[in-house]
Image (spheres, grey):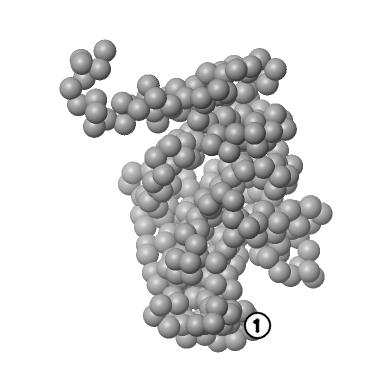
């Protein structure tokens, strides 16, 4: 069959015949849509409407995915087979899925609008592609063709405020409600505060600026975070990257478990739980990408067509690209 395709060895679909996925999803239409996206990435899928029917289909499988409703089954499967990768999707608040990330090597929860809708196709494809090939998507992968983008280095606290004001002015040109601009400003401020105050360390490996997050900073060249922003008119994307790579997977999961556990934003406690909760409430999805000792990159997306009133209670996506087995 491959003889009919002389360029097959250079084509991503050549590997279509060598990898496979298992989908557990009760809604047949949703399952077919997910399978179609996975097949386009080069990951053929077998569909089951409930865990009891999976049987031996996991033998040799590379990916297992399904709704968080079946999270116990999926978590147990990946605990038994560390080479098996997993994705969950959910139409419920993220906090209900966090226990699977805390208890098992599951790093991806994809939001969906409701139980009759699949996860967002671009997000599903991006995640599956990286799980298969190990290559991160560029910022342009988060937006449609025809977008506008901006990239800036942040050198000081004054520079931080200028960058945030610039982003606010750009978002205002889209004609969105003022509350959207304010929400995104909170998100940007928190991500930059983490990158500027919490990430830098001295020669002894000790935090340099974390003791006083109100102090004015003038960062050295090697300490400066980079901000990338893009929008295609339907989505806002903000990416903040620091050159230290000190964030650990457990910090994210534990912080969100604490911050979302009560259902309220408790500013009295402070700490990582507060900051992560602010980022969660202000975004549609969060992607944490850590190269230990080299960089931490956080990418937040905001869907402009969503109902602003439901932003805090709707399903959110979370992706953790960290090495398995880290402390």
Residue at the top extreme, as displayed: 1
Residue 301: x percent and y percent? 52, 51
The residue shown at (57%, 70%) is 194
Tell me which corner region of the image, top left, top right, bottom left or bottom right, holds residue 125.
top left
- Please say whether residue 282 is visible from this viewpoint: no
Which residue is at the front of the view, 116 or 326?
Answer: 326
The crowding category of the residue bearing disc 1, from other C-alpha atoms within 10 Å (few below 14, some 14 to 19, many at least 20), is: few
Residue 101 shown left or right of residue 290 in the figure = right
Residue 150: x percent and y percent? 37, 62
Residue 25: x percent and y percent? 62, 23
The image shows residue 42, relative to residue 141, as above or below, that is above
Find disc 1 in the rendering and name its residue.
211
Tell me which corner region of the image, top left, top right, bottom left or bottom right, holds residue 8.
top left
- Please say whether residue 230 is visible from this viewpoint: yes
Tell me which corner region of the image, top left, top right, bottom left or bottom right, holds residue 214.
bottom right
Residue 150 shown left or right of residue 189 in the figure = left
The residue shown at (39%, 28%) is 42
Which residue is at the front of the view, 143 or 277?
Answer: 277
Which residue is at the front of the view, 75 or 195?
Answer: 75
Which residue is at the front of the view, 15 or 269?
Answer: 15
Give the total number of marks visible in the rendering. 1
The residue shown at (49%, 75%) is 160
The image shows residue 137, relative to residue 87, as above or below, that is below
Residue 94 shown left or right of residue 291 in the figure = right
Residue 267: x percent and y percent? 76, 68
The residue shown at (39%, 69%) is 152
């Amino acid at each position: 069959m491959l003889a009919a395709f002389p360029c097959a060895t250079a084509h991503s679909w050549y590997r279509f015949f060598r990898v496979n996925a298992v989908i557990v999803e009760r809604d047949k239409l949703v399952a077919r849509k997910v399978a179609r996206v996975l097949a386009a990435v080069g990951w053929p899928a077998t569909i089951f409407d409930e865990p009891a029917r999976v049987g031996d289909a996991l033998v040799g499988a590379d990916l297992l995915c399904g709704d968080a409703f079946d999270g116990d089954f999926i978590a147990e499967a990946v605990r038994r087979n560390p080479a098996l990768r997993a994705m969950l999707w959910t139409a419920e608040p993220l906090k209900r899925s966090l226990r699977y990330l805390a208890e098992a090597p599951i790093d991806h929860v994809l939001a969906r609008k409701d139980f009759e809708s699949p996860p967002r196709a671009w997000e599903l494809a991006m995640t599956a592609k990286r799980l298969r090939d190990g290559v991160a998507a560029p910022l342009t992968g988060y937006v449609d063709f025809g977008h506008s983008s901006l990239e800036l280095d942040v050198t000081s606290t004054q520079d931080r405020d200028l960058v945030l004001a610039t982003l606010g002015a750009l978002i205002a040109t889209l004609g969105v409600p003022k509350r959207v601009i304010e929400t995104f400003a909170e998100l940007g401020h928190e991500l930059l505060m983490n990158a500027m105050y919490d990430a830098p360390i001295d020669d002894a490996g000790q935090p340099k600026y974390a003791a006083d997050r109100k102090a004015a900073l003038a960062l050295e060249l090697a300490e400066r975070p980079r901000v990338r922003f893009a929008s295609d008119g339907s989505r806002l994307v903000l990416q903040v990257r620091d050159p230290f790579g000190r964030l650990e997977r457990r910090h994210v999961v534990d912080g969100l478990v604490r911050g979302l556990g009560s259902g309220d934003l408790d500013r009295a406690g402070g700490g990582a739980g507060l900051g992560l909760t602010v980022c969660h409430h202000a975004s549609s999805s969060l992607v944490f990408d850590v190269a230990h000792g080299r960089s931490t990159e956080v990418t937040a997306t905001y869907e402009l067509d969503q109902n602003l009133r439901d932003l805090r209670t709707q399903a959110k996506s979370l992706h953790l690209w960290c090495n398995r087995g880290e402390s």
